[in-house]
Amino acid sequence: MIEIGSAIRDLKPGDRVVMTFQPTCGSCLPCAEGRSALCIPGAEANGKGVLMPGEIRLHDCHDHNDIYHHCGVSAYAEHAVISRHSLVKVDADDIPFEELALFGCAVQTGVGAVLNTCRVQPGQSVAIVGLGGVGLAALLGAVAAGATEIIAVDLSDDKLTVARDLGATLCYNAKDPGLIDRIRAETGGGVDHAVELAGAVPAFDLAYEITRRGGQTVTAGLAAPTAEFTLPAVNVVADERTIKGSYMGSCVPQRDIPRFIRMYQAGKLPVDKLLTGRLTLDQINEGFDLLDRGEAIRQVIIFG
């Protein structure tokens, strides 16, 4: 951090901070309930593309047109103006900036979905459906939580290889015939927790079908706004199923980002293994192409 506004009292230039894509006010009802991911003013600001106070502080240097603040971060630049509501101060001088950057999005969403939303307990079984950067972070969260059966499902055999290296006990390609029956047989009727992170209806359907009676299916993948899925109502009742959404891993950033960093420092959450690329700003399009082809997990833009 280079400069701070005159009203900021708890930060100073040179402090290390992690940016979070959901600004939190700390005082609305969801924030007061410990559900910062649902912050009402934060969601409104993100929807408008402005900072929490309602301002736009980015402008084109040539024609001076406004540039909206995407999710309050807008970090694809050498400098950015960020609201205090989108920053978490961290004590992590021993961690490179490119590794700290991982905690603001993928780690919050993936690890948080397992630890906060699912509340996985030691000895339970977990399935992760969709192995992008967020899905693999969720897999690391399942390992850290002490899950004894961790099932990884994806369309990419390369991603399944990575999942196995990160601690998955069973790996399946989503195209495998009879996949649902195989997983249910391997797990004695299904898993305790199935987490969908692909953002696709077929992935959610699969996650639901491999969840055991009395288990819960959590979706943290953002599907298209027009996407819909159907569920057998009698099955939800008779099997006492739980279906939950998870936004930003149900995290309280000020609490969970430092917590996840401490886990990383203790060797219990090796998120650095998710970092597959360090790019310069002029390589940004190449980086997006790699993501689109499924050839990268997490990439970070490095300046200087």
Image: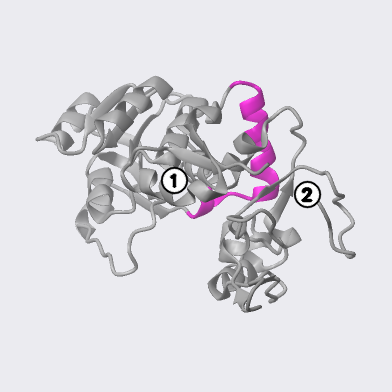
Q: Amino acid at mark 2?
A: Met
Instruction: Give the labeled residue for mark 2.
Output: 1
Closer to us: 282 or 213: 282
- First in sequence, mark 1 or 2: give its number: 2
| Label 1 to label 2: alpha-carbon separation | 25 Å
Write the residue at 32% across / 48% down: 241
Q: Is residue 266 above or below residue 207?
A: above
Instruction: Give the labeled residue for mark 1.
Output: 287
Is residue 50 visible in this depiction of the protein?
yes
Spot occupied by residue 304 in the image (x, y as percentages of width and height): 68, 41
Spot occupied by residue 284 in the image (x, y as percentages of width and height): 48, 50
Q: What secondary structure is marked by label 1?
A: helix
Seen in the image, is 7 located left or right of residue 154? right
Seen in the image, is 205 located left or right of residue 178? right
> Which span is picked out in magenta?
247-267
Q: Residue furthest left?
A: 177
